[in-house]
Image (cartoon, rainbow, N blue to C red):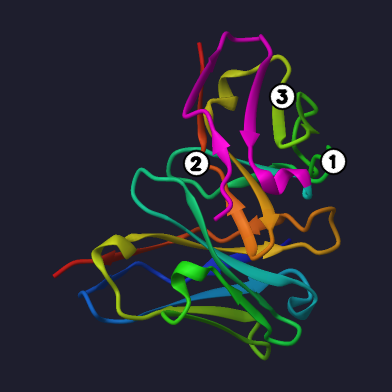
Amino acid sequence: SSELTQDPAVSVALGQTVRITCQGDSLRSYYASWYQQKPGQAPVLVIYGKNNRPSGIPDRFSGSSSGNTASLTITGAQAEDEADYYCNSRDSSGNLFGGGTKLTVL
Amino acid sequence: QVQLVQSGAEVKKPGASVKVSCKASGYTFTSYGISWVRQAPGQGLEWMGWISAYNGNTNYAQKLQGRVTMTTDTSTSTAYMELRSLRSDDTAVYYCARENSLLEQQPFDYWGQGTLVTVSS
């Protein structure tokens, strides 16, 4: 079955740039969406499609894709960006989520 | 503003069923689909399935086929997810999320607050 693979944990110094990646065969056919989840809260959509941000999402968040890999980049990470990040894409039978990446801002 | 408000926490015994509701407001309910996503304690997100609020078509995750049923009541703008033959590993927070077909790749742009379902004897 299809799956999306993410690094379990990533850290970044305050104000620096971090890239969170997601790999999977479905990403050759579909763009990834990215969700931010803070403890005890529902996920929040931060990036969708080729590289689109919903209203209210800071422009330091951006998305990209190449081959079977999608990336979420945070340029100038802030303390409030510390959270779990999940990639998501369609596949032939429905939807998939990656296992999530815990981002720590140092 | 768009809101999805879910029903309250549930405690169920193994083998029982649970039905979680998700009441939508702030948009035309029948113009969007609803997906259900669950999250076991300390774990990641798992997509459970989708229902069209327009015509009731469904698509369930293969691992839940036969145990899950998703329905909608357009008169009250409410979506429901029923899970049967509950097991301890069904213990999770269950979310409903609006699937926005107007956006590229149809992301989940609004989420409910989550409903904790605990399965324990």
- Write down the chain letter for disc 2: A
Q: Secondary structure at mark 3?
A: strand
Above-or-below relation of B113 to A80? below
Give the side of residue B48 with respect to residue B91, left or right. right
Q: Which residue is mark 1?
A: A50
Specify whether residue A104 is painted magenta: no
Q: Earlier in the sequence, mark 2 or mark 3?
A: 3
Q: Secondary structure at mark 2?
A: loop
The x, y position of residue A62, in whole percent, is: 78, 29
Q: Nearer the viewer, residue B7 or B109?
A: B109
Q: Earlier in the sequence, mark 2 or mark 1?
A: 1
In the rendered structure, which amino acid carries the disc numbered 2? Gly
The x, y position of residue A53, in whole percent, is: 80, 40
The x, y position of residue B6, in whole percent, is: 50, 69
Q: Quadrant of the N terminus of chain B?
A: bottom right
What crowding class fits label 1: few (fewer than 14 Cα within 10 Å), some (14-19), or many (20 or more)? some
Q: Which residue is mark 2?
A: A99
Above-or-below relation of A71 to B36? above
In the rendered structure, which amino acid carries the disc numbered 3? Thr
Q: Quadrant of the C terminus of chain B?
A: bottom left
Above-or-below relation of B9 to A98? below
- Write down the chain letter for disc 1: A
Q: Which residues are magenta?
A: A1-28
Q: Which residue is mark 3?
A: A73
Q: Residue at x 64, y 48 (%)?
A: A88
